[in-house]
Image: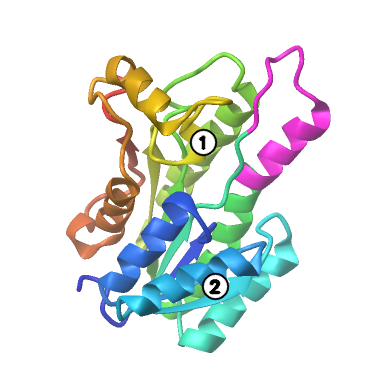
């Protein structure tokens, strides 16, 4: 119960690592706000949290729109009383080599993955400055600051920017009581780690040789890393980029 009586906001909380993280916070006593563009998957996350005795609410918001993010933080505070921890997880995955990528795809990738994090931090920090502090965890990727893969240039650029933005903000606000870090997952048990037409069995066979760990990570392992770095146990960890990738970038 490391997060008993804490209010936690998770963007992109309707599926994958975002949902697993929201459920993990709820199991540890937090009141969780899950945010995303579509209400139905968010409501499913809320239902799963409540089935295990947790507390959660859903708020729809598009992190690429400043007005939406400002409202999201305001509604979180109005509903739950404050905002102690924010996990900025919303993101998209796009493909295309440098000479082939469509300009609209490039802009969309950076708008969601990078600008979405920037806007989220902007309004989260604004509240935390008035509330006496807080914790922010941004979710990046091993692809970006740590690893490059042909065909993923836009995605890599957007996620490397998240890492740089996070570490800069960490320096700017730690003296104000706001602790900011980033978690960079490698291949986990999501559709993002699967190639077109690949089955889970195909992926498992490929990962036996592709990763030192010999497998993809579980969603619970990704969530566990996020919860640790958000917890008081990591209180001296500031501006860190925690890579959780099964040894992929060693």
The residue under the point 75% across, 21% down is 101
Q: Find residue 43 and name its label.
A: 2
Q: Element at badge 2?
A: helix
| Residue at which label 1 appears | 192
Along the viewing direction, whichever of 193 and 37 lies nearer the viewer: 193
- Give the x, y percent position of residue 57: 50, 79
Contact between marks 1 and 2 (CB within 8 A): the answer is no
Q: Is residue 177 above or below residue 54?
A: above
- Give the x, y percent position of residue 218: 31, 43
Along the viewing direction, whichever of 45 and 84 lies nearer the viewer: 45
* Residue 40 quadrant: bottom right
**Which portion, as a residue range, is magenta?**
94-113
Which quadrant does the N terminus fall into?
bottom left
> Which class describes the residues within 10 Å of circle 1: few (<14), some (14-19), or many (20+)?
few
- Looking at the image, residue 62 sits to the left or right of residue 85; the answer is right
Residue 189 lies in the magenta-colored region: no
């Amino acid at each position: 119960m490391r997060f008993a009586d804490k209010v936690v906001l998770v963007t992109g909380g309707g599926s994958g690592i975002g949902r697993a993280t929201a459920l993990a916070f709820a199991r540890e006593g937090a009141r969780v706000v899950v945010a995303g563009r579509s209400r139905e998957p968010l409501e499913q996350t809320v239902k799963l949290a409540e089935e295990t005795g947790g507390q959660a609410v859903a708020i729809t918001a598009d992190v690429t729109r400043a007005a939406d993010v400002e409202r999201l933080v305001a509604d979180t505070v109005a509903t739950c009383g404050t905002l102690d921890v924010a996990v900025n997880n919303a993101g998209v995955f796009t493909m295309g080599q440098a000479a082939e990528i469509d300009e609209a795809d490039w802009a969309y990738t950076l708008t969601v993955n990078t600008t979405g994090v920037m806007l989220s931090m902007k309004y989260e920090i604004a509240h935390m400055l008035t509330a006496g502090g807080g914790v922010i965890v941004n979710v990046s990727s091993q692809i970006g600051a740590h690893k490059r893969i042909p065909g993923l240039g836009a995605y890599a650029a957007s996620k490397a920017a998240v890492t740089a933005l996070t570490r800069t903000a960490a320096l700017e606000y730690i003296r104000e009581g706001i602790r900011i870090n980033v978690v960079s997952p490698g291949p986990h048990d999501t559709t993002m780690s699967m190639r077109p037409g690949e089955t889970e069995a195909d992926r498992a066979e490929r990962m036996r040789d592709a990763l030192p760990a010999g497998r993809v990570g579980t969603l619970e392992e990704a969530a566990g890393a996020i919860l640790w770095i958000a917890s008081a146990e990591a209180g001296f960890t500031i501006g860190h980029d925690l890579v959780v990738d099964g040894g992929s970038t060693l």
